[in-house]
């Protein structure tokens, strides 16, 4: 059973309906997502604070493509409390495949590895919005991205839905408004919240999913 307080979608139940809804709203085809995430932590040294970085490997590309990502703290204060999205700094850089070795040399240690599988939509709607629907598995064997059977779902039967957009200090309130208003279109199926805030289940979800599914079924005939 699913804990009712999380803003997540039971995998088999509504994911297909959500995909149909997103396809209609975004007007672009979905992209499949298969990302190997390596979470590294620095060993605190000489009074410096521990830091965490993620090395991502996009497994959908013909040649694995590597990215380094650092996610900073979230914006705080009254202004941050008033908007319904989380604003945080993120630095991302493309990297070559020896990036892992570089971070080991810099004193980082591998904390855990995850395999993220799902799909994404990228489109322009008042901001450059990305919607991802994905689930995470923990990899038991080191770097075992091929043998999915050896991976253990972190949250079995649960998909995570994320809506993100890039913003700057000048335009974040505009971007936050665009993201919030897009999320309202998903309301029949799910309510999204800031990470860590629970929203409860959407009572209309089952009916909305059923009608989306039957609608798409009839257009196929
Ligand atoms: C806001 O600024 C960021 C960073 O410069 C940019 O990538 C994004 O497209 C801007 N968004 C809007 C809606 O102007």
Image (cartoon, rainbow, N blue to C red):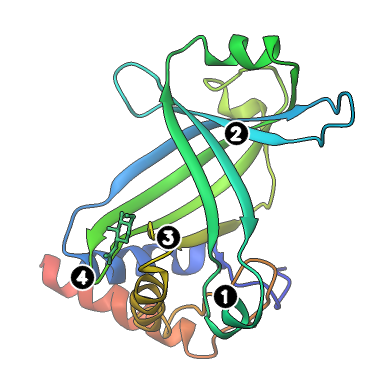
| Residue 90 placement (x, y as % from top left) | 51, 47
Q: Earlier in the sequence, mark 2 or mark 1?
A: 2
Distance from disc 2 to disc 1, alpha carbons, whole Å, reads 23 Å
Q: Which residue is mark 1?
A: 193
Q: Secondary structure at mark 1?
A: loop
Q: Nearer the viewer, mark 2 or mark 4?
A: 2
Mark 4, other Cα within 10 Å: few <14 / some 14–19 / many ≥20: few
Q: Which residue is mark 2?
A: 54
Q: Earlier in the sequence, mark 2 or mark 4?
A: 4
In depth, the one of 199 and 216 nearer the eye is: 199
Q: Which residue is mark 3?
A: 164
Q: In the image, what residue occupies the spot 12% across and 71% down?
A: 219
Q: Earlier in the sequence, mark 3 or mark 2?
A: 2
Q: Earlier in the sequence, mark 4 or mark 1?
A: 4
Looking at the rendering, the quadrant in which ligand 1 lies is bottom left
Distance from disc 3 to disc 2, alpha carbons, whole Å, reads 17 Å
| Residue 159 placement (x, y as % from top left) | 55, 57
């Amino acid at each position: 059973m699913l804990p009712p307080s999380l803003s997540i979608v039971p995998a088999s139940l509504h994911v297909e309906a959500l995909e149909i809804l997103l396809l209609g709203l975004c007007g672009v085809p979905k992209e499949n997502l298969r990302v190997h995430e390596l979470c590294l932590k620095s060993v605190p040294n000489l009074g410096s604070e521990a830091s965490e970085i993620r090395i991502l490997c996009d497994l959908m590309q013909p040649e694995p493509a590597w990215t380094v990502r650092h996610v900073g703290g979230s914006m705080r204060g009254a202004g941050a409390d008033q908007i319904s999205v989380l604003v945080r700094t993120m630095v991302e850089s493309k990297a070559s495949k020896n990036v892992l070795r570089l971070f080991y040399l810099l004193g980082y240690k591998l904390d855990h590895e995850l395999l993220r599988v799902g799909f994404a939509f990228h489109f322009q709607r008042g901001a450059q919005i990305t919607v991802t629907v994905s689930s995470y598995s923990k990899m038991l064997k080191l770097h075992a991205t091929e043998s999915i059977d050896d991976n253990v779902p972190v949250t079995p039967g649960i998909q995570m839905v994320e809506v993100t957009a890039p913003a700057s200090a000048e335009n974040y309130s505009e971007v936050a408004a665009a993201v919030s208003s897009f999320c309202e279109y998903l309301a029949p199926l799910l309510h999204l919240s800031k990470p860590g805030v629970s929203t409860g289940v959407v009572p209309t979800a089952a009916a909305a999913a059923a009608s989306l599914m039957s609608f798409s079924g009839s257009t196929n005939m």
